[in-house]
Image: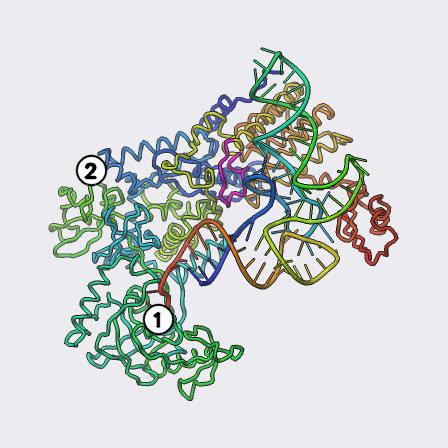
Amino acid sequence: MGEHRYQPQEIEPRWQALWERERTWEVTNGGAAEAGDGARGGSPPPKSYVLEMLPYPSGEPHIGHLKCYALGDAIAHFHRRLGRRVLHPMGYDAFGLPAENHAIKTGVHPRESTAESIASFQRQFRSWGISVDWSRELATCEPSYYRWTQWIFLELFRAGLAYRKEAAVKWCPKDQTVLANEQVDADGRCERCGALVEIRQLEQWFLRITDYAERLLSDLEGIEWPENVKTMQRNWIGRSEGAEVIFRCEAPAIDYPVFTTRPDTLFGATFFVIAPEHPDVMRLAAGTDCEHAVREYVTHSLNETNEERGNLEKPKTGVPLGRTVINPVNGERLPMYVADYVLMEYGTGAIMAVPAHDERDHAFARAFDLPIRRVIAAPETQEPQDQELPYTGAGVLVNSHPDFDGMDSRAALAAIVAWLDREGKGHASVNYRLRDWLVSRQRYWGCPIPILYCERCGVVPVAEEQLPVVLPDIDDYTPKGRSPLAAAEDWVNTSCPECGGAARRETDTMDTFVDSSWYFLRYCDAANERAAWDRSALREWMAVDQYIGGVEHAILHLMYARFFCKALADLGHLDFQEPFQALFTQGMVTKDGSKMSKSKGNVVSPAAIVERLGADTARCYILFVGPPEQDADWSDDGVEGVHRFLSRLWRLAAETAEGAGPEAGELAMAAMPEGEDLALARKTHWAIDKASTDLRRFAFNTAIAAVMELLNDCSRLRDAVDVRTLRFALGSAASLLFPFAPHVSADIYERLTGERVWEQPWPQAEEAMLESDVYELVCQVNGKVRDRVQASADASPQTLKDLCRAAPNVKAHLDGREIVKEIVVPGKLVNLVVR
RNA sequence: GCCCGGGUGGCGGAAUGGCAUACGCAAUCGACUUAAAAUCGAUGGCUCGCAAGGGCAUGUGGGUUCGAAUCCCACCCCGGGCACCA
């Protein structure tokens, strides 16, 4: 039967055309009721919103995209066949720097290169057969989308959650733009281009995410996310409990609050430090002997890069300010210093220094020969000579005050805070590491910030009916330290909606993370021209039931999207707090153990694989290669192996369908299978059970392996079983494989049954078929396997012991020795313990 | 430095207290073929043995258990996140 050859190039476009023509994967809003009226008659089917992170369209899709969407599509299909109405949309995160940098080099408008890339993504996603509801497709760079990004910005602005502030900001000299803290890597380099980041003082737009720190932290409890992602978010939010304590400077008379997590060490404070960026630094130093030295030090630190300043190896530096503050607990005068190890952005920009119990303060005290006073004694388990300083653990208070000495440091902490509170010198306080989100970008290819500056009225929001503020076309994208939009004079100059006078537009654009912080809401009501969404649409679909994406977005995107939902819920636009109920983070795809990159020349093109072997092979392979949450190394031989598997499956099914003749219809095994028929029927039910369990736990690799095992048995038994049994086994294999390899599975299923596999419910394993009446009993002596014997499923423990003892190789190992214990695990093994 | 992952055949991996190495790749042998490719069949950790069978193997060393890749303690190595956050 040589004419049966698996030809994905023929099969795949045929099924894709059918799905496209019939709009198979589209779902309507408000459609739950209709869908429920049908055969079931009862309650409407539950919804499921399955979403993969939207791609950034740059060039062509790569293997990582294939993995992400193959994974999400498997889940979407699985949910559909479990009877849920599945929303599975697609869009493009289409604003951003790469398109703009490309424009600077080539002069091609970012809109054009982006559109070209989107077209390529669209073509490839279709060629992969991803089951997307294309009626909801969007791109964030379209005015019909960013109009509502601007609307959200204005909502945040009116609520005081978007504000303008002059700040020391991270500036990338190469990309000529401000960066968010999150976009600067550990070495103080621009995440995107790798240039060393500088600090500049500029007026910028911020979103007040810090208002939501506590809720962003506590609401992590209720969502099903990987623990490592939750931990990363917790660390990023960085909640610290402690106290704010006021230190008074008498000349000039100013109160300086500091934040400390260790108010129990207050009596050990021996000096006081403020950050070089602190606005009072020069005022404090003015007129003292130190003025000149302070000015030099501050200038030097402000010019230092993050990398230099953040270097922990570097010895502590600083200079005295020539002033003192008073320690509120004991009235001592502490000398003030300015030092760059204190950060302006955290706490109050000033600290009390306790060198005996803080490593950084200790290093500074040693460098400047300042007194070090122990006020916490380590627990007595340690010998006094071992109690080196600094000691940062808990212990017993010493050298402090008669009221507190001898107390446990944790109890003393509370007592001292209570005392400070009563005296009006401090209070309990919580600090977060999280900073407000800087969203201004001095770049062209982004969403315009819908704000005007009027000489008379000041900062004025663009009137809602004038949205969108459309991004104008310009000729020169080259960054010059201000937004390229500033050159579009006709666009910049406008009139004030309040007084009618002359006004200028904001020329900065928004960080692209703003665009992607709400796209999942828009999908629910993508065609709405009157509003960003209708609340009933969100009620129908949100929250996302399963979100899928790379772990590289664990902090930024996922935190911002959560913040947007909370803020929009507070403003009355949403009814829920958390956008993503469950999250799955997929691992990278590498080649020869390292990240694919053009410079290494190890890029695997999905298009080439699809063309040569078909989308089903590519999708199956990427899921078969290993657990999807782990990194996977691409192997050209491995992908051939999966192709062989699909070929064998298709070929055997095609031959079986032909042999089975016109008899089609519902899949069923023979009523009372016996012998090899029973064995194959059992194997089929085993595979159904295994694949179903594995799909629920995202173990796609073992689910596919189970179908491979089933096919191996089909091949082995093809001539020994009834054709109905074989048809049932192969049809089930296709049904189980459909979420991973939809085209070939649909083709096989149709050949065998005449039915559309995606319209069939997910197969159910029959409990009775999962159990066998005999099994192989493992016989152990002293925990070592010595033999295996046939045992019947209902044998008593005593029978099993006897069987085991009678096994030939067990006998040999007993050899007259005394049995001291017998362990029986029915269905598995017997272990005889001998002496 | 702190916090997460991970370490199993030649390779990707399977097994979460009970038959270690499922499934796949690569390899070797055989069938078909003038030949090759494709396909089909067989073999399958290391080691001793003709064989039956034995011994040793899940990063290292201890422990718990009738029984440990799996649980506990200590350590080594690899990957990721955070890092002067008071």
Residue reaching furthest to the right: A816
- Which chain does the numbered disc 2 sit on? A
Q: Position of residue A482 (x, y in %)?
A: 18, 48
Q: Is residue A659 above or below residue B11?
A: above
Q: Quadrant of the C terminus of chain A?
A: bottom right
Tag 2: amino acid: Asp
Left/right of residue A129 with respect to residue A441 in the rendered view: right
The residue positioned 62% from the left and 33% from the top of the image is A708
Give the residue pinned by disc 1: A363
Which corner quadrant of the image does residue A767 belong to? top right
Q: Quadrant of residue A92?
A: top left
SS label for mark 2: loop
Q: Which residues are magenta?
A: A621-636
Instruction: Answer whether residue A597 is magenta in the image.
Output: no
| Relative height, residue A574 to residue A766 (above, below) | below
In the depicted view, which residue is nearer to us: A577 or A268? Answer: A268
- The circle drawn on residue A237 is none
Same chain for mark 1 and mark 2? The answer is yes
Q: Chain of mark 1?
A: A
Q: Position of residue A321 (x, y in %)?
A: 22, 74
**Alpha carbon distance from label 1 to label 2:** 56 Å
**Which residue does the image show at 31% across and 72% down from the upper left?**
A367
Decide which of tag 1 and tag 2 comes sooner along the chain: 1
Does the rendering let one see residue A224?
no
Q: Please name whichever residue, A542 or A697, is drawn nearer the observer in this view of the structure.
A: A697
For disc 2, the marked residue is A473
